[in-house]
Image: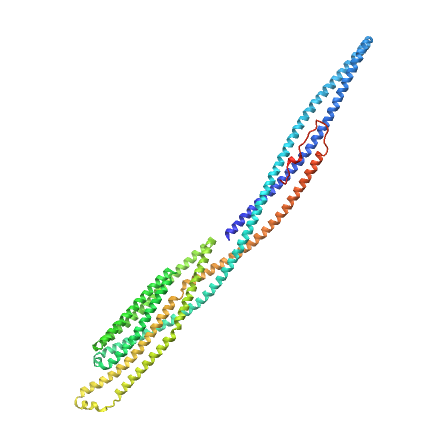
Amino acid sequence: MRESKQKMEKYLKQYDGLFRTTHSLTEAMQLQWQKNVELHKENVLVEHELDVKEQQIQTITRDAVKTDKLMEIAESSYKMSKASAPTEKLKLELENLINITLEAEKKQSELLTKKLEEMLREREVLNKMLVKANDRTQATFDLMKIKENTMKNLQNEINGLKAHVKKQRAQIQQLVGEREKYEREAANATQKFMTSLEEAKLQDLQVVSLQQKIVESESRLKQQQNLYEAVRTDRNLYSKQLIESQEEIGDMKRKFKIMNHQIEQLKEEITSKDHALVKEHFDHHKVDKEKEILKNELLRIKKQIQSSEQIILNQEQEVTKLAKIIQEADEEKQRQIKEYGCVVHDRDTLRQQLIQRNEELSVLYEKIKIQKSTLSKGYFQYQEKLKEVTNLQSRIHALTLERDSSNNQLSHEGSLKQELIRLEKELLQEKTKIRALSEELDHPLNVHRWRKLEGSDPKRFEMIRKLQAMQKKLIRRYEETTIKDLLILEKEKLYVELKTILARQPGAEVAEQLVVYKETLKGKQNQMKQMEEELQMYKMQVNEYRHDLGLLEKEKRQIQQEWINRQLKAYSNQFGNERGDGNTLVYGDPASYGNPED
């Protein structure tokens, strides 16, 4: 738009220059016309003076002829007087008379010859002046032709400028249409931005709730550590529970099958994340960070898989080596400590990411200041920003697709819930079995089977009673640990899901960029409004100039018509009557002076 504005200013300046040149040419034409009229008047006066001088010359020639005749008469009378033999007095009188008349005639003839010479000189001067006047008129007609040609060229240039103005109007209309289209796109982008802000607020609330849950899980972990310490004290008593541990091993095998199934699901999630990583190359820095995070998660999951496989091997060895149960419990404790360390590490990484995000926000604020200073650099950067807006729209579209995919994943929760209900039923069945066994231990059918030992071997009887009490206590602890393990698994699943959702959600950078783009778009809209007002003003100026051009065209035509009429009248007055004398000057054909329309 600035380029079109500069072009319009350039064309208006050219139009002003052409208008000034036409005005100056019309003024010069009027001055030349006045000069032509004055020269024509001078020509008429010179012709009149020439006529008067010719009449004077004719009268002088007539007087000279008369004097010649008088001289002849005097000479004849003198001869007659000689022939008649006059007296001396008459001779003297006649001689005196003749001398007087001769002197007078000589003086008159000298005066007449002087006058004739002066008149001839004046006639030559007037002829020269007439020739110069004719040359001047011819030069003025030539100038008139040149100026008329320049007027035609200027008219052609004006027509070209009009056509260019039409093209500029078409371009302006096209730009207005594009502006409306971009306004609609910006409105859609703002709506999407508001929805993403609301989703970000919800995610913040979920993060707060998850942090609270993490704190609760830490407290539970401490309780479990205390419980494990209590179990370590009872390590010597666990060596005598081979039969019951075999049943527990069967249960553990089933659990390990479930764990293998979960591991396969985790592998599928890893492959899906890999595919998502391949697709998300639009922002290199963020993708690299997400890759690092995912690599850490993969390492953690691989460690979990390795630890689970190690647990499977250890528990298969427990069939033959029951003494290693406590060591495996220690290993389980260490694994949970490692997981706790991983959780702490993830928390630290999240803190580092928050710090990095804050640093990136500070960098972005500096960039915003730089962009505010560079906003005045023009239309080219405006187009780049529009391209960035389109990229952001595509990114928002990709985020919506990811959200839909996450919703689809959430739609599969029904099957998982059914499986969870099935597992809970199995757990209740196992609990009922354990209760039945515990009731059998509390209320045995053969009550009197230990009476022999009570009388014969009381120490052994006490050891058996203690063993039964420890078995009951171990069953209760085992139930509590299974319940806590299930709770920990659920918390871990929730934590992983929320982590993936948070990783997919747009960060504060996108929000800041959208705010910046919204502000720039408002500025551009204000600029477009100003440019529309300027365009309306230029349209009004163009209409005024067109009106002025129409008036000038009418005035030019009127002046040309008046000039033609005056020329025709002048030529008709000048050449209407042909002169009979040979000394009269003959002028050229008026057609030789040219038509002012040529």
Query: Colour mode?
Result: rainbow
Seen in the image, is 512 located left or right of residue 330? right
Which of 111/383 is in front? 383
Q: Quadrant of residue 122?
A: top right
Residue 234: quadrant of the picture: bottom left
- Image location (x, y in percent) of residue 500: 37, 68
Asked whether, in this view, residue 516 is left or right of residue 31, the answer is: left
Q: Is residue 123 above or below residue 280?
A: above
- Placement of 588 over or under 246, stated as above or below: above
x%, y% of residue 325? 23, 77
Q: Nearer the viewer, residue 69 or 32?
A: 69
Q: Quadrant of the C terminus?
A: top right
Q: Is residue 8 above or below residue 239?
A: above
Residue 202 visible to the viewer = yes
User: Can you tell which quarter of the image residue 222 is in?
Assistant: bottom left
**131 left or right, relative to 359:** right
The answer to whether residue 204 shows anywhere in this view is no
Task: Count all numbered tags in the image, as a single digit.
Answer: 0
